Image (spheres, helix red, strand yellow):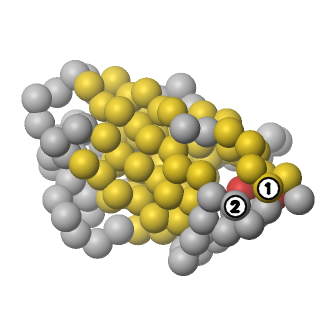
Amino acid sequence: QVQLVESGGGSVQAGGSLRVSCAASGRTSSNYPMAWFRQAPGKEREFVAAVPWFAGRTYYADSVKGRFTISRDNAKNTVYLQMNSLKPEDTAVYYCAADWSRSRWTPSPLIADYDSWGQGTQVTVSS
């Protein structure tokens, strides 16, 4: 099992930046993909970004490509999402997720493929 705890959300004006973090615990190794999803009020949860367990290609939703950067520090069992040039439409609860039960080489953008989820952290962008 993997437990996830997000932090770093908050409120910012459009054009600003925020970084959210996700600390993982419960396993001795970090060899599993991790991802960020988000859910805006009245909308379904959607994929934002994902990173494999090794230092390789990262994956992004088209809506955040070029503005958001996902990274991970396996020594600290932590994954980050740096969000720049934020827009009001980025307002949502951001969730960290871990796909630890399968030997998946490429991260999945599908909610069903993730085994553990954090409690979420609110990001609010005002215009």
Secondary structure of the residue carrying tag 2 is loop
Say whether residue 42 is left or right of residue 51.
right
Q: Are marks 2 and 1 in contact (CB under 8 Å)?
A: yes
Q: Tell which of 2 and 103 is nearer to you.
A: 2
Q: Tell which of 113 and 74 is nearer to you.
A: 74
Residue farthest toward the left in the current orientation of the protein: 28
Residue farthest toward the right in the current orientation of the protein: 127
Q: How many marks?
A: 2
Q: Is residue 104 visible?
A: no
Q: Is residue 51 visible?
A: yes
Secondary structure of the residue carrying tag 1 is strand
Label 1 sits on residue = 13
Query: Residue 90, how many percent across, how many down?
Result: 71, 56
Query: Residue 120, how many percent across, how many down?
Result: 57, 32
Q: Residue at x 24, y 38 (%)?
A: 77
Label 2 sits on residue = 16
Q: Quadrant of residue 24?
A: top left
Query: Residue 29, how many percent across, how many down?
Result: 11, 36
Q: Quadrant of residue 26?
A: top left
Q: Which amino acid lies under the numbered mark 2 shown in the image of this protein?
A: Gly
Q: Which amino acid lies under the numbered mark 1 shown in the image of this protein?
A: Gln
Q: Tell which of 30 and 43 is nearer to you.
A: 30
Question: How many neighbours does mark 1 have within 10 angstroms: few (below 14), some (14-19), or many (20 or more)?
Answer: some
Q: Residue at x 35, y 46 (%)?
A: 79
- Tell me if residue 18 comes above or below residue 23 in the rendering: below
Query: Residue 121, how many percent across, how many down?
Result: 60, 34
